[in-house]
Image: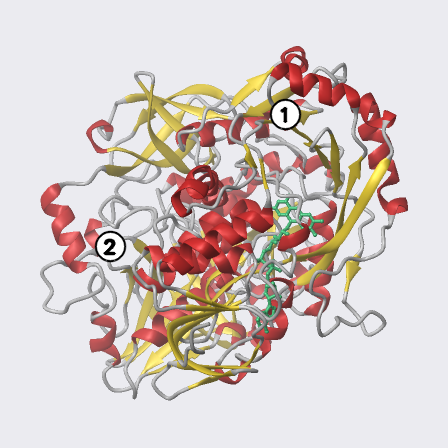
Amino acid sequence: MSEFPTKARVVIIGGGAVGASSLYHLAKKGWTDCALLEKNELTAGSTWHAAGNVPTFSTSWAVMNMQRYSTELYAGLGEAVDYPMNYHVTGSLRLAHSEERMLEFRRAAAMGRYQGMEIELLPPEEAKARYPFLETHDLAGVLYDPHDGDIDPAQLTQALAKGARSMGARILRFTPATGVTQKADGSWIVHTDKGDIACDHVVNAAGYYAQRVGEWFKPYGGRTVPMMVMSHQYLLSEEVPEVEAWTKQSGHKLPLLRDVDTSYYLRQEKHGFNLGPYEPNCRAHWVDESDPMPEDFSFQLWQDDLDRIEEIVTDAMERVPLLATSGVSRVINGPIPYAPDGLPLLGPMPGVRNAYEACVFTFGIAQAGGAGKVLAEWIVDGATEWDMWACDPRRFTDYTDHDYCVAKGMEVYGHEYAMHFPWHEWPAGRDRKLSPVHDKITALGGQMGAYNGWERANWFAKAGDDTSEAATHTWGRSGPWEQRIREECEAVRDGVGVLDLPGFSRFEVSGPGAAEALRGLVTGGLPKVGRLNLVYIADDRGRILTEMSCIRRGEDDFLMITAATAQWHDRDILTKAMPSGVTVTDVTTTRDTLIVTGPNSRALLAGISDADLTLGWLSHQEAVVAGRPAMLIRVSFAGELGWEIHAANADMPAIHDAVLDAGAKPFGMWALNSLRIEKGYRAWKGDLSTDYTLLEGGLERFVKLDKPQDFPGKPALLAEKQRGVKKRFVTLVVDAGDCDAPYMSCLWHGGEIVGETTSGAWGYRVGASIALGMLRADLAVPGTELEVEIYGTKHRAVVQQDRPLWDPENERLRA
Ligand SMILES: Cc1cc2nc3c(=O)[nH]c(=O)nc-3n(C[C@H](O)[C@H](O)[C@H](O)COP(=O)(O)OP(=O)(O)OC[C@H]3O[C@@H](n4cnc5c(N)ncnc54)[C@H](O)[C@@H]3O)c2cc1C
């Protein structure tokens, strides 16, 4: 046995599938001097007892990327590391009970095809040909994914470990990490019961123990890891002679079955079945003092609890009657960690330098391969190939306390396979952060949605409108909200509207050298004092990291305003980039914002404020509104004459009342989305993401390649400019039918996929369905006809001129 390593480049805490894959991928990138600590034997956490299903299906582009990569890796891993494993690519049948579900399948199938996977949609009869024991009379259709399968989770982990070891990485079993200390230079000492290891980076891959490990990072800027633990069970049946006979005759296993509307999977296990339900009446564990989390739960399980899943088991027996002919041979009931949205925490640890998370995986076997790749890219390259915001730990901020995590975890588990409709807001864990005018908004009929924990009105209902959750279960445009959105947009077009927008992320950046440091960070120029600019920040590859409104209050005094959801992401960027002497202060919660916009907004504000309303577009000023101090910024994301009013929380109710009394009509986020798309304004982490460079994103006017300062991405953007872009941002008008194009709808031309949409909505001012998207550069010519595949149906779409559809000269905005 070699000596205990006192130094490593990276220390990974946790030896499940994800930790092992992270070590393997670091080593593959040449970082072989890394170590993994496992307090027990490898796989002792959730990994050893996992069912081992490896789907590719997801409605998230990022998660699909990760899962697809896993399947590709697993197919060749045994041979690559000389560790034969049981990996069965059986294909899977995903059953739809409704047309709405079929639309979800069609969308995912198109995304899968775009990623190179031949996913098919079958009529029920054809599914029966692949799975003769299946009852199909009540099905609307079936999705067949030929890449789905199952793997032995322990063998997978051992194979990854073997591969990592053979490249020189160290795995220390029975070596619990007991704490961490960060040194002044940002490097770490990881303490173990066998000694200390000094390292540059540390990774929390502790599975369901991640919250405990996370506590150690609090003195260095960390937060409580947002997670909870669910109990998940699967049943193994006795052998079934018919299954054995069928397997012998066909030469392969049955495809995996997922009855997503009933909420279970059913897989062939040897010659019997493995049935795994996600039951609505689910059970959380270790969430209060009556059920404390034990110090060690390695290789342990809970007692069976079959009552909870009885209904689903009965249903499954009707779907596959053969299941009822065999008895239960074993029940596995084990811990499975959940983040509040059911996706893992994978990426930089919020607020902590040189620390990362690769934990809280609910599908960690299917995702381990891709997760290891992503984690290694974060550490080695500082950026990932695919935009991974969906899994970025910074997507959760300070509102995710224990009660929230438990409520959301239970909700997600109980709806594991639920459809995520664009109009639907999940009810658990709400009202975490309220605007100072929240009660007024709801009294006005505001139908609320959560944005980084902040409640904002999506639309305003009138008496008699159907505001039930059930009404939102549609992919279509029409619903009780449609007429209201139209009215809200028309009010903004013809009169004046007001939108309460709490939770804008705000950072004060000030101190000597602030301007110079920002010049070295953003791609474009800074505004003059008294003005504001939109600024962009790129990564080293010139890809779009973020967009901020930069308000210059003094030579070295800036207020940076960004999307609510970007709060911790952008905080990281700013704090990392600023030199000592320049402070970055998060003042998000101190103020609220109203957008007051429409042709009558000037007249309205003239009646209630002393502001100089002749100041031009992109100006800002301190003023008194309704007798209260406020900052007015002349911008409008809705694309009309308008101002943002930023005021202290205590002052906002009076200002809001005055704006309403002066005749502004309240409008919501869904109207704003329609209005901004008509202007071609991009939204963060849809239209603006690290999947695209600034030049591809059509943001060249925000890039000053000739400025003297170097900024991240400058060489890459220079090179790209010379070479030419591969893709280009376009606005499309779509003959869309009932549904507008969702994110990642494929663009077709001449029988080929040539791009994708990044957002879509109906534009009520222009009377058309609009999509923003990224298109192969040679086709990004006004007038080019394409097809956009929306939920499985291709619709004609035409590339528009490179200017806003509404008010192309910005005359209304600058009026
Ligand atoms: C019944 C059941 C069935 C499942 N089926 C599937 C499935 O079919 N497909 C799928 O994709 N997923 C499935 N899962 C989920 C899957 O098991 C997990 O997502 C996955 O195992 C997580 O892997 P991990 O490496 O993140 O965590 P873990 O496997 O939990 O590994 C974390 C490791 O960290 C170690 N550790 C903790 N603290 C310390 C410390 N201080 N020092 C050193 N080591 C430490 C632990 O001992 C543990 O080994 C299932 C889960 C359950 C409960």
- Give residue 541's mark: 2
557, 332: nearer the viewer: 332
* Residue type at tag 1: Lys
Q: In which quadrant of the rendered view does residue 348 lie?
A: bottom left
Q: In which quadrant of the rendered view does residue 255 lie?
A: top right
**What element does badge 2 sit on?**
loop
Q: Position of residue 33 (x, y in %)?
A: 35, 69
104, 35: nearer the viewer: 35
* Residue type at tag 2: Arg
Mark 2, residues whose alpha carbon is within 10 Å: few (<14), some, or many (≥20)? some
Q: Position of residue 523 (x, y in %)?
A: 22, 61
- Marks 2 and 1 sit apart, C-alpha to C-alpha, by 45 Å
- For this view, does 3 lie left or right of residue 661? left
- Give residue 447's mark: none
- The first of marks 2 and 1 along the sequence is 1
Q: With respect to residue 469, does 754 lie above or below?
A: above
Residue at 41% in and 40% down: 79
Q: With respect to residue 222, does 171 lie above or below?
A: above
Asked if residue 610 can be seen in this view, the reply is no
Q: Position of residue 228 (x, y in %)?
A: 69, 62
